[in-house]
Image (cartoon, grey):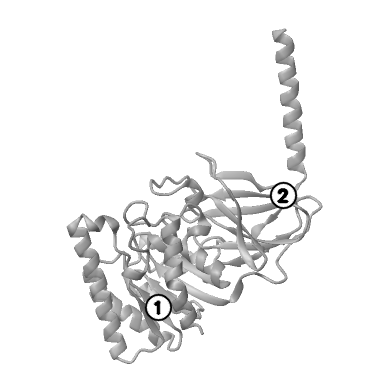
Amino acid sequence: MKRSLFGCLVIAATIFNAATAFAQEMIRYTDAGAFLMTGKAKKTNAIYQRIDSVETKDMTKAVQGLAKNSAGIAILFETNSTVIRAKWKLASEVFLSNMTPIGHSGLDLYCFKDGKWQFVMVAKPAKGQIDNDQIIIQNMDSSMKQFMLYLPLYNTVNDLQIGVSEQAIIRTPAQPGINTAKRVVIYGSSILQGASASRPGMAYPAILQRKTGFDVINLGFSGSAKMEIEVAKYLATVPADLYILDCIPNPSPEEIRDRSYNFIKYLRQQKPSTPIILIETIFRENGNWDRKLGKNVSNQNEEIRKTYERLKKEGITNFYYISSDKLIGNDHEATIDGVHLTDQGFTRMAEAVLPLIRKALK
């Protein structure tokens, strides 16, 4: 009886494996680079990194490394496939104690439905693997739909293949749900890059992208957005209808005093008519208890406000400012670790910035 049961299990496993293999054979893969890409400042040799290595050579080592992360990059395509699968190769295995694996190394799929972007499903990275292959969604109807696939926030993608049913159509959208001709470029810290969103689509630049329909460029560099003039020189070469500077969390008050004026002044001189929004650092929740930290944050905001007022007195126009008290609410429930935001915090951040974006671009 035991042998018979064992034999049945072997046969069942064989059939299951054969069926799985057959199903995999029915998937046709296309390099994601063949479709429409959003969230890229400029073209790069390594297609899924944010800034080309040649252009970061004068920046800090930290920025050079973080610029290879794919934060904010998304792929737009349309298909009538009933299944969507993805194969993606990561540069390394990442561990971040304040982020989910989906957020730092996974994929996040949205569908453009009734004129709005709606979440579909994520692709979860496998533990200990850099090569991932996963069905994202299946059993859909066969109508033509437009999708947007967000790439990882804190990892580098070396290859990405999108799989659909063998007989299905997959192509670049005829009418993209994102207007890539309208560009908002944001420079900032780990909060901007996406710590600690549960998934890539919940970083606040991605939320703004879906709410506005604009191409939002995420140039967040975790712990490393310190307003070096080399970054200002790069930003000035990036085509933009609006610049947002959310970089105050990283530099010390002294660095803000020494660097912020020249940084913003240079950007304005190079882009005399492009609107600029300057955002104070969010107040750290643990700063309510750690008096030294709380004082430092207050000093950071004090110094950047001085810079803003100085530039306004000099006659800079199309220049906007958001204070920290308007960013993430006052119930003290918007962060995961006192500093980095939860999905709720990112949603509040996006809602705070959105009216000023519309005002600046009206």
* Vertical order, 176 against 94 (above or below): below
- Mark number displayed over residue 277: 1
C-alpha distance separating marks 2 and 1: 41 Å
Please rate how many residues cluster around mark 1, counting C-alpha atoms within 10 Å: few if below 14, some from 14 to 19, many from 20: some
* Vertical order, 95 against 266 (above or below): above
In-image side of 251 versus 9 (left or right): left
Residue 183 makes an appearance in the image: yes
Q: Secondary structure at mark 1?
A: strand
Picture coordinates of residue 217 (x, y %)?
A: 50, 69
- Image quadrant containing the N terminus: top right
Name the residue nearer the viewer: 119 or 15: 119
Picture coordinates of residue 354 (x, y %)?
A: 47, 73
Residue type pointed to by label 2: Val
Q: Secondary structure at mark 2?
A: loop
- Which mark sits nearer the N-terminus, 2 or 1? 2
Q: Going 72% across and 20% down the picture, which residue do you hit?
A: 10
Q: Going 49% across and 60% down the picture, which residue do you hit?
A: 71
In-image side of 41 versus 307 (left or right): right
* Vertical order, 123 against 70 (above or below): above
Hey, which quadrant is residue 135 in on the image?
top right
Name the residue nearer the viewer: 32 or 323: 323
* Vertical order, 10 against 139 (above or below): above
Q: Going 38% across and 89% down the picture, which residue do you hit?
A: 317
- Mark number displayed over residue 83: 2
